[in-house]
Amino acid sequence: MRLLLPFLLALPVLASGQTATDPAPLAAARAGYLRELLSVSQKLTGQYEAALARTEAELAAAGGYEEALLIKRRRDELKALYPANEAEVALSLAVPLPVQQARLSGSVEARTDMLTNWRTNGSGAEWSGVRLTPGRYYLELEASLNQVAAPPDALLPDRVRPQDRAVFEFHELSLLPGAAESRRSFEISLSPDESSFASVQIGPIQFTRSPVTVRLAATTGYPGNQIRLRALRLIPAVEPPTTVVTQSTPEGPTLDSLKKSLAENLAAVQKPLADAYLARLRELAASDATLKEAAEAEQRRVLRLLSNTSGAALRLSSASSPLNAFDDLDDVRYVPGDTDEGDRFEVEHEGKRMRVQLLWVQCAPNDPASDPARAKDFREHFRLDDTSVATLGHLAQEFTTGYLEGKPLRLLVRPGRNKDGSVSALVFLPEIGLYQNILVDQGLAAVVPPKERRGVSETGLLDTLIEREQAARRRKPAPGAWALSEIHP
C-alpha cells in the first residue's frame, strides 16, 4: 500500500517556501498550474483516501496492525496535500489580482499595494490574461472610504461633495454569451477612520473560459473622498461537500478498482494541464534569456513526473522514491576550485557548471571573517571557540574534495536558485548514499532542518540526519567538531 501519485507528492514541495526565489513569470506560471491540478484532483483523491480508510479499519479489525499503520501514513500524507476544510480550499485556490499588474484608466493610481485616487468618472483597473479554472468565483477585497477634509462653510457642488458610500462595478470584458450576466455592482461604506479597512465580498460570478480579462470601475467620480482598495483576489465559490460512502457494500467498488479509476481519471485531467504548462514554459524560455535555464529545468521536472505514466493511466509510485519535485541529475562530477567549502562547491553536468550548496547541513566557512553569520551559527551549534571554527572549515573543505573528486554523483536539485546563484541539492554517491550523512558522521557539519517537512521521503532523510548527528555526538572518541565541543558528553 505504499502508493502515491508522483505529481501530487510534488504539490506541497513546490508550494512551500524556499530559500531560492524563482523568477516572477515562472513562479506565476507554476502557481497557476498547481492551482488547476489541485482543483481537478482533490475530489478524486478524497474518494481514494476514503477507500483507504475503509481498508485500514478492516485490516485493524482483522489484526493486520502493521499494514493498517502503513495505510494510515499514506492517508495522512494524502490529507496533507490539501487544505483541511472548504474555506481553506477556496483560499488555496485564490487567484490574486495584483495592483501593479492592472492597466489603469482615469485618475486611479497604484500606490504600493493599493488602488487609490478614484476621483474622476471612468476611473478603472483592468487585469488581462487571468488564468483560472472555469466556475463560480467571489471577488474579495479590502476597502477604505474616507471623506476629504473641507471647511465647514464650504459651498461645494453636489458632484464634488464627500459621499458616505461609493458604488463600483466588476465584470468580465467579453462579448461572448454569458459574460454580461456576471456583471456585479457593489457599495463601499464610509470607514470610521483612515486606518480602517473593511472586507468586501462580491458575487458569485460565473466564468466559463480561461484566461479572462476583468475590469473594476467606479460608477462615478469621487473627488471629495479618499478611496483605497487592496488585497483583490478571486475566490472559488465553495460547493456543497461530496459525501463518500466508506462502508463496504456488495455493489461497492473494490480498493483496486477505485485505485485504477483514480489513476485513469487523474491522468486524463492531468495531461491537458501539463501540455499547456509545458507550452507556457517554452514560451518563457524563448522570450527571455534570463528565464531560459530556470524554465528548461522546470520542463525537465514536469516531463519526469509525466514519465510515470503507462498508457492512459498514471503509474503509482512508491512513497519511498526520490523527492519528485527536485530536478534529478545523474553522472554529475565534482570540480575542485579555490572557493570550495565543505558544503559549497562546483559541479559539472552535461558540460555545464553550477555551484552547489548542500541542503539541510552547514559546514564552517573557510574564513569566518568573510561569513560571520554562518561562523556564528556553526560555533553556537557545537559551542566552539573562533580558532576551532576556522580549523574545522578547512578540514571540511579538504574532506569534501578528497571524498567527492573523481566519483560519479547523483544530485536532487531543488527548483530555483539561491541569492548567490547557487542551487540547493541533496548529493548521493553510488553504493554509499547521501553525502550529507557522511559529513555529519565525521562531525564536520551541523544539521539545519527546514521549518517545514513535506512528504515521507523528505521526513525520512531528515530524521536519519538528526539521528546520525546525535550518534556522532555520543561517540567515543568524538569525531570532528564534537571532539572540541564544550557540550560533548
Image: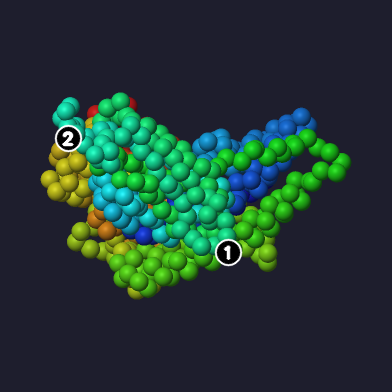
Count residues near mark 2 (Cα–Cα under 10 Å), then give few for <14, some for 14-19, many for 20+: some
| Residue 260 visible in the shown view | yes
Tag 2: amino acid: Asp
On the picture, is 275 further left or further right than 348?
right
Q: Which quadrant: the N terminus?
A: top right
420 above or below 456? below
Q: Position of residue 460 (x, y in %)?
A: 50, 42
Spot occupied by residue 170 in the image (x, y as percentages of width and height): 44, 48
Task: Determine the image quadrant of residue 226.
Answer: top left
Report the residue at 26% width, 36% height from top: 161
Say the numbered circle drawn on residue 272: 1
Say whether disc 1 or disc 2 marks the residue closer to the N-terminus: 1
Q: Look at mark 2 in the image and give the residue it sits on.
A: 385
Type of residue at label 1? Answer: Pro
Quadrant housing the C terminus: top left
Q: Which mark is residue 403?
A: none
Residue at image x 31%, y 71%? 289
Q: Quadrant of residue 449?
A: top left
